[in-house]
Image (tube, helix red, strand yellow):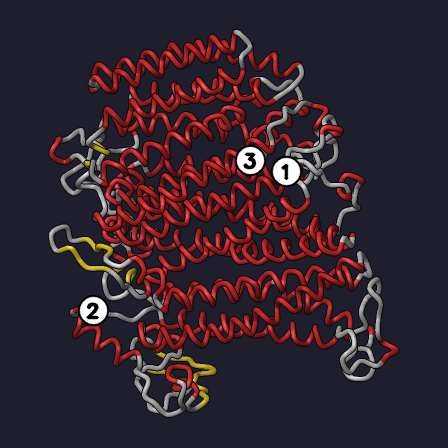
Amino acid sequence: MELHDIWFVLIAVLWTGYFFLEGFDFGVGVLTKLLARDRAEKRVLINTIGPVWDGNEVWLLTAGGATFAAFPEWYATLFSGFYLPLLLILVCLIVRGVAFEYRAKRSEEAWQTNWEHAIFWTSLIPAFLWGVAFANIVRGVKIDQHKEYVGTFGDLLNVYSVLGGLVTLTLFTFHGAVFTSLKTVGEIRDRSRALATRLGVATAVLALVFLGWTQVSRGDASSLAAAVVAVLALVGALGANLAGREGWSFALSGVTIAAAVAMLFLTLFPNVMPSSLDPAWNLTVTNAASSPYTLKITTWCAAIATPLVLLYQGWTYWVFRKRIGTQHIADAAH
Amino acid sequence: MDLALAPETLARWQFGITTVYHFLFVPLTISLAALTAGLQTAWVRTEKEKYLRATKFWGKLFLINIAMGVVTGIVQEFQFGMNWSDYSRFVGDIFGAPLAFEALIAFFFESTFIGLWIFGWDKLPKKIHLACIWMVALGTVLSAYFILAANSWMQHPVGYKINEATGRAELTDFWAVLTQNTALTQFFHTITAAFLVGGAFMVGISAFHLARRRHVPVMRSSLRVGLVTLIIAGLGTAVSGDLLGKVMYEQQPMKMAAAEALWDGEAPAPFSVFAYGDVEKGHNEVAIEIPGLLSFLAHNDFDSFVPGINDVNKAEQQQFGPGDYRPNIPVAYWGFRWMIGFGMASLGLGMLGLWLTRKRFLLPAAYRTGEDEVPHLVLFKKPLSPKLASWYWILALWTMGFPLIANSWGWIFTEMGRQPWVVYGVLRTREAVSPGVSQAEVLTSMIVFTLLYAVLAVIEVRLLVKYVKAGPPELTEADLNPPTRIGGDDAHADRPMAFSY
């Protein structure tokens, strides 16, 4: 295995970390409208991710920075090519971060309601768009011989990619509902479990179609194995949720995300961004990669830093391990 | 295509707008993180309540500020790929590495420990909670270092070779990129300038309250911390600025000639105080100068030769082929002056403030004040008249803005002074832009970012004003009795969270 192959795996790991972690916090954002009955419950939801959402989002920045370092051509083509969807994601992430931090800082009704709307939409839109983006990467887009994206914004919206978007949206919302049932106490916990069941069924149907389509059109044995793991884990997560085993359910919905990301990356390899115009113009792990020297340095950095990150981020979850309910939410504005 | 709306021009405007805006929050974040950590350390060591109240007050303003710094920083991570894809392709091998390091080491640090600090008041024992804010402070400094190493490579590329086969720059010596003198001096200068911002911020807000005789114990201590920070940072900025100037004279003679509007080389070269010139003809029409000072800034003596704009332009034409290698001279010239002027003005006001509010030194015993009194503003033997005193407090409040103006112009000067190069001597800015991104797309994103940032600025400033006016919070029983166990004490399991969104 050469360094650029290792980096292909590492990029997949970073995206897995991102979708696993920000997946549930996007889900929680969506649930503020689907699940919460009043402001106190909304605040319970928001506070389950309060201490961690920022750290979760850094997985995205790291995926971006690492792609820049390890596969500059991929970074350049992807982000200049998917310009407008990425702009929309960035705007959402900007507003979303400010919404979390500022919502409780004034007591005016309109102020708080507006930020609550913002939290819902800015969680829902990226949760959908990341699926659209990855479906397009896997499907292949119009890339010319100069590695430039030459398609239009409209080309990025097709049945397959919209389906991909619906899968990530429902999967993340399911993941978020399972997370909520694990992190809350009281009535909201029961309702989030009930909602998780319905979301899980919807996710399973959509995911089955999307992963099946992906497998039939461009899969191989290894991607099939990953797809099977994803589906089994999702079924397991649903079962655990029904049985009231919230920890297991969350772990398994996490496995679903990891296996689904693995499946998409397995169908890509050795490409990183296939061209729909001519296979000769595909961006691959070799023609998009940095020099071996740069890959070696960044490998060392990742090998040392990533376990540490997992350690102290894991510790954060342990510090905030207690469930919260409406009784833990203070009235006053901060 | 009309030059004013060419994608390259628009992409540059967007980069300028989003980056200057981002950098309004960055220096305050870097300095306030450390200053808040310092105040909290004082609380943990002395157990004086005023330090805890100060920590909570400045910590809240810090959080309102860092939220904006974080979210506007997300754009920076992706903008190179979005708008500067040819740049990214060409330099990714080198430029991407420090960015990846920054994310893996610094961003994770900052974001994880800030969450622990915000929500950790009733979940972490005192000392561990304190360690969290220090980790955040460390993260901000590490982040600055990596991104400045990357920027320094654009100012002065080292440790690379051009791969003829791929036409890309490739890294050959990462250590050189991280430790070249451009990176080290730029880091020194940027960090000291950041503390200038934080010091002035503390001075201005403390002055606001002291002038109204409110929250005196907290604000009196904060004023002193702010003034001392302002002076140390101001002196550090001057020293590091001088070092950085000498590095730039050596590495980017055009930038420094432009900063001085020195059209033709001179020995000894003068420092320009005021100039008005004709860029087309390449000379100044009005010039007020201090003889020999530029030679000193460049070479530490008062008589050596400093090349001028026209000389460097000719030399670069010979080296790189026909073309105009001059940056925007008025922007470089005035940017350089606004940077120094506003930076040093804030240092001067800090020195004046520390002298006026001195505790003992050369202060008549009658005017010494206790910890809960507003200090008298004593110039020599007698306090200032009430009118003059209120003027000082107002001036101190305005000082808050000075280092921000200086920081912004410093970066505008540094980046625009490097033009037409994006990587000095290696890659031109017009060759760096994304060829596949249309004019309409860049125009859209530029308008969206500008409007969004303008709205957020209004929201943020109004929120800061609200919390500044509110003053330090009253302490609660829970504040004074932090938990002894990680995760919070069981006895308080059903108590509302000390902080919640």
Question: Residue A3 appears in which quarter of the rendering?
Answer: top left
Question: Residue A78 appears in which quarter of the rendering?
Answer: top left
Q: Position of residue B480 (x, y in %)?
A: 77, 44
The residue sitting at the front extreme is B485
Query: Please, what is the three-letter code of the amino acid marked with disc 2?
Result: Gly
Q: Nearer the viewer, residue B433 or A139?
A: A139
Q: Residue at x 26, y 59 (%)?
A: B173
Query: Please, what is the three-letter code of the amino acid marked with disc 1?
Result: Phe
The correct choice, above or below, for B414 with respect to A257 in the image is below
- Are the residues under marks 1 and 3 on the same chain? no
Q: Nearer the viewer, residue A307 or A284?
A: A307
Q: Position of residue A322 (x, y in %)?
A: 63, 26
Question: Please, what secondary structure does the residue beneath circle 1 have?
Answer: helix
Check disc 3 and report the residue beneath it: A316
Query: Please, what is the three-letter code of the amino acid marked with disc 3?
Result: Thr
- Mark 1–mark 2 Cα distance, whole angstroms, equals 57 Å
Q: Is residue B88 left or right of residue A110?
A: left
Check disc 1 and report the residue beneath it: B119
Chain containing the residue with disc 1: B
Q: Residue at x 26, y 77 (%)?
A: B312
Q: Residue at x 65, y 47 (%)?
A: B127
The correct choice, above or below, for A287 with respect to B150 in the image is above
The correct choice, above or below, for A172 with respect to A308 in the image is above
1 and 2 marks in contact (CB < 8 Å) = no
